[in-house]
Each structure stands twice: as structure tokens, then as C-alpha cells.
Image: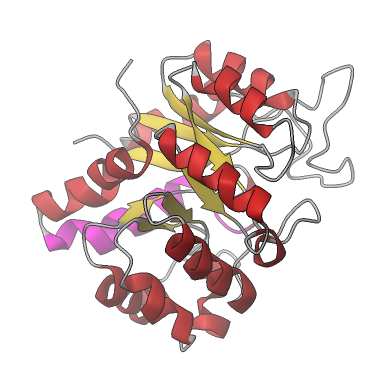
Amino acid sequence: MKIIDTHIHLFDTTRPQGVPYPSRDNAVLWKPALPKRYRDLAEPLGVTGAIAVEASPWVEDNLWLLETCGADKFMLGAIGNLEPEKPEFREYLDRYAKNPLFRGIRYGNLWGRSLRQAVETHAFVDGAKQLAQAGLSLDTANQNHELLEAVVRLSDKVPELRIVIDHLPNAMEQLKDDPMLLQIAKRKQIYLKVSEVIQKQNDDMKRYQPMLDHLWELFGEDRLMFGSDWPNWDTHASLAAIVGLAKAYVMPKGELVAEKFFWKNSLAAYRWTER
């Protein structure tokens, strides 16, 4: 069975121009995170491909990410960094969308941005419509109530846009009763990554079962997908522990359900192609 990791980050801390992320004082992350390093860890665990999500606000790093993914057939796609409200958005979108590895952009509570504010502007909504017309998706990051509310508003304004919510498990302690989750659950074009699950090196399934069950009840088997957040989550757990926990939770649900979770739902959300 295919296992597609829908959320890894790539960066090269040895680049002459440096990197905006991670910071040099992060001893765990301050080293190159490139496809081969990830593949060497992931393939023995049964992972068969991955999608990289931008780790830089520099617009020129969209090209770096595409070139880096393009050099390794293990990489199935890249989620870039563009700002739909900017005048130059359409030019960049047209340029990058020609590359089949470019599967969408990420916009949320990072790099000083606010989706809640952006979604109230005509320029952003127009850019989101262009993104949808190109067959691409929008990821959101660093979940809180305001971001979930903004996702609902964006989905209502651009219902044809596929939206992917990243890392919700890490915020579920605060958001488990948030009414926006029920609203999001009604919108079939919104997908959820089951990423950032393990907390502080604790991979005991009993701790996470209630939260995972709650997400499963809300979103069902057709809209949840696996993501590791490698190497960011190295501060919390090894890749082996992350993949192991996902398998332990999903595999008992049966092979057909596991196929949806581990690869088919990501295909629906990102429309990546085999290489």
C-alpha cells in the first residue's frame, strides 16, 4: 500500500544566502533537510512518497523548492508560498502552475499574515478564485479560532477552492469544542492533515485515541490524510514513532479505509501525479 506523507519541510542551511527558517540557535533543526535525508528515514517505514510544504516567505524559494523536489522522484509535490492579495500574484501563479509539482500555496498564521483579514479583501478573494481555477489548493497553518473562522468564510466565498487544514491535532486541546469545526465538517472541499499528533515524546496511543476519534467522527474517512511535519516534529518524536502511531490507529479500520487515509485522500486534495 502507498503511504504518502503530505507534510514535510525542505531547507538547506548551507546555502550562501542563508534560510529564513529554521533559526541557527535551533540545535535540532539547524542542518540540511533535503529529500535524500528524508527518504532514507521514510522508505524503511513503508512511506512511498512525500509532499513538501514551504518553509520560507521568500518568493524566489518557490523555485528552489520546485527544483529540489524535481531532482528526486520520491517527491510528488510542493506547496509554495505566494500571497493572493499581491498585484504580482497572477504572474507568479501562471509561472509556477506550469510545473506539475506545484500543487498549491500555504497561507495562515505565519510570516506575519492574517487570513482573517485577507479574506475580507477583494484582492485576496480574487486571487483565491484564480488558485481554484488553476486546480490548486490552499493550506492553512497554526490553527486557532480566528483561522478556522477565516477558513469557513473563504470556503463560502470560493466554494470551489480545495482547502487543507494543517496540524489541527496539535491545537485540539483548545479547539475541540470550537463551533467552527462543525461548520468546516459540512464543507466537503476542506481536508484535514492528521499531523503534529505526538506530544513531547509520548507515543502512547491511549493518550491520543479520544482526540483522533473526535476528528474521525467530524471529518470521516474521506477527508483525513497523513502528515508527519518532518523535520519540525523531530523535537517531539522520531519519524518512526509518528508513522507507527498513524498505522496503529488507522490499520485496524481496514485496508480500504487505510488506503484513503495514507494516499487516496491526498490525491483528491492535491491532485498529485505519479512520477
226 vs 118, nearest the viewer = 118
**Quarter holding the C terminus?**
top left
262 vs 248, nearest the viewer = 262
Where does the image place residue 224, in percent across and percent down from the top left? 32, 58
Verify whether residue 250 appears in magenta.
Answer: yes
Q: How many marks?
A: 0
192 vs 50, nearest the viewer = 192
Residue 218, placed above or below residue 242: below
Residue 74, quarter of picture:
top left
Residue at horizontal 66%, vertical 61%?
115
Residue 202, placed above or below residue 106: below
Where does the image place residue 233, in percent across and percent down from the top left? 60, 52
Where does the image place residue 219, in percent across and percent down from the top left? 29, 68
Can the viewer see residue 19 in this picture?
yes
117 vs 113, nearest the viewer = 117
Residue at horizontal 30%, vertical 72%?
186
Where does the image place residue 34, in percent across and percent down from the top left? 61, 24
Can the viewer see residue 202 in this picture?
no
Residue 137, placed above or below residue 80: below
Residue at horizontal 89%, vertical 16%?
16
Question: Which stretch appears magenta?
Answer: 236-253
Verify whether residue 245 appears in magenta.
Answer: yes
